Image: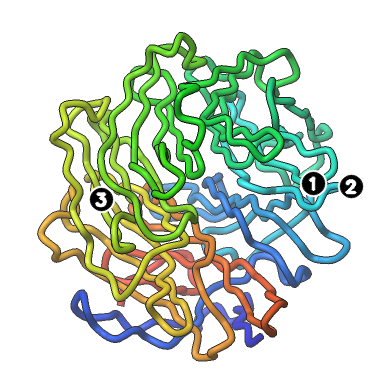
Amino acid sequence: MTRRTLDPALDNLVFWVIIVAGTMSAPVQAQVGTELDTVSTNYGRYVSMILSPSAARGATGIEEAPLVAYENRSIGRQGLAVSRCFDPLCRSVDSATLDDRGSSNGAGIDSRILRGADGHAIIIHRRIGVGSALRVVRCGVANCLGSLGAADTINTITPDQGVAVSMDAAIGSDGFPVIAALLQSGGTDLGLWVIKCSDSVCSLPTTQTQIDPSRPLSGRVIDMVIGASGFPQIAFQDRENSGSNGQMAVLTCNDHACAGQDEALSSLDDLGGGTGRIIDMKLNSSGHPVLAYTGLNSTLRVIRCDDPDCAGGNDLPNIVPTLGSITQAIAMDLDSQDRPAMAAQNTGLTPDGLEIIFCNDPSCSGGDERRVDVFQSDQQDIALGAWVDAVFDPNDRLQIVYQTVERANSTVFLGSLYQIRCEFDGCGLIFADRFEAP
């Protein structure tokens, strides 16, 4: 695998990816970015990112840098891992395994890194295999790495029934974690559940709610936020029949634990394509959900709801033009003007590439969104974007972390995580204290 690991000593060297002009331009052949963990050789699935204060100071004060959780599958380092960037361009990075997989087959599955009410990072993830469980890790220092502090806290959550096979999590308005999960028992789906913690690290008994027993197939894909009401809001795959990918639905809860089976459910659009991480939801400045997902024919779609519950049946999708099928991974965030930006793995490219799109309006309407860059390897055995997350910093610069996968042979795949930073006009990396678009 050919890696371009950027040297911090090259402070004035600029690597630019040529801007792709127009929405249907040919992709640029490039692999650009900073590798987050040069010691490991197979990592980066289930990536999740927040931003944390860095050691760098910009024109507006202390700048923020990525804090990233993911699954590490490297020999000797297997489990839930975290990488902390000490500057916005990840020129200085520290990495560690926080929760070893132990006797399980894996740890760090569906990892979600969050900022707790006390400012410390909390990571919720699944261990699978022997001793399968939901796990909660609270970092002993606010940003997990970089200084001495208290030991990390690790707790296990046992579902009332079965085991979790997919999940997402958020910090509730009461400061306690809440988890949405598809539970399964003996291979039988039990549908979407909500697990509400009653303390900041989930050490006390939890409240567990089966959302709708008549929908046992729902919840294979989940994304959750805390809605404008202060209660959980869940976007998920609402799948009633085994022969269909089902509907993209939004559940709006009216209490912290989604109890009572009286939550509001809105079904918005048909789902299509694969069953990867194909739903991402954020709230705009009005408290209304904005959803990016894969719909019929593996098209990239965006819905901006016109009310906090996506009720009324008039929330229609806008199809965003892409270079090919989007079936595995989508990450989306909103800038200060509520305009979505998306990074998605495009399986229509050979090899798969990371397509980055900035919408020029809050609904991504008109089919004229701006594709600023397509990151694609110049080697046929490397694919980009199999797992991806994206977050805007306070200066409307989009931080993206994404996995590259080397297809060593038909059965061996090796992964690495890379980081880039984008503006509306382009994506690239400058070794200076600021970022400029070309």
Query: Residue at the spot x=37%, y=27% of the render?
Result: 251
- Identify the mark nearer the N-term, 1 or 2: 2
Image quadrant where residue 268 sits: top left
Q: Position of residue 374 (x, y in %)?
A: 37, 76
Tag 3 residue: 302
Tag 1 residue: 129
Q: Position of residue 179 (x, y in %)?
A: 57, 29
181 or 179, nearer to the observer: 181
Which mark lies nearer to you, 3 or 1? 1
Q: Is residue 393 above or below residue 39?
A: above
Tag 3, which secondary structure? strand
Q: Position of residue 418 (x, y in %)?
A: 57, 68
177 or 435, nearer to the observer: 177
Q: Quadrant of the N terminus?
A: bottom right
Task: Give the amino acid type for the residue marked by disc 2 in the picture.
Answer: Ser
Q: Is residue 91 above or below residue 281?
A: below
State if disc 3 and disc 2 touch (CB < 8 Å). no
Residue 178 can be seen in this image: yes
Q: Is residue 170 left or right of residue 292?
A: right
Estimate how packed mark 3 is, as few (under 14), some (14 to 19) or many (20 or more) residues with alpha carbons within 10 Å: many
State the separation of the CA atoms marked 3 and 1.
36 Å
State the separation of the CA atoms marked 2 and 3.
41 Å
Which mark lies nearer to you, 1 or 2? 1
- Identify the mark nearer the N-term, 3 or 1: 1
State if disc 2 and disc 1 touch (CB < 8 Å). yes
Estimate how packed mark 2 is, as few (under 14), some (14 to 19) or many (20 or more) residues with alpha carbons within 10 Å: few
Tag 2 residue: 103
Task: Give the amino acid type for the residue marked by disc 1 in the picture.
Answer: Gly
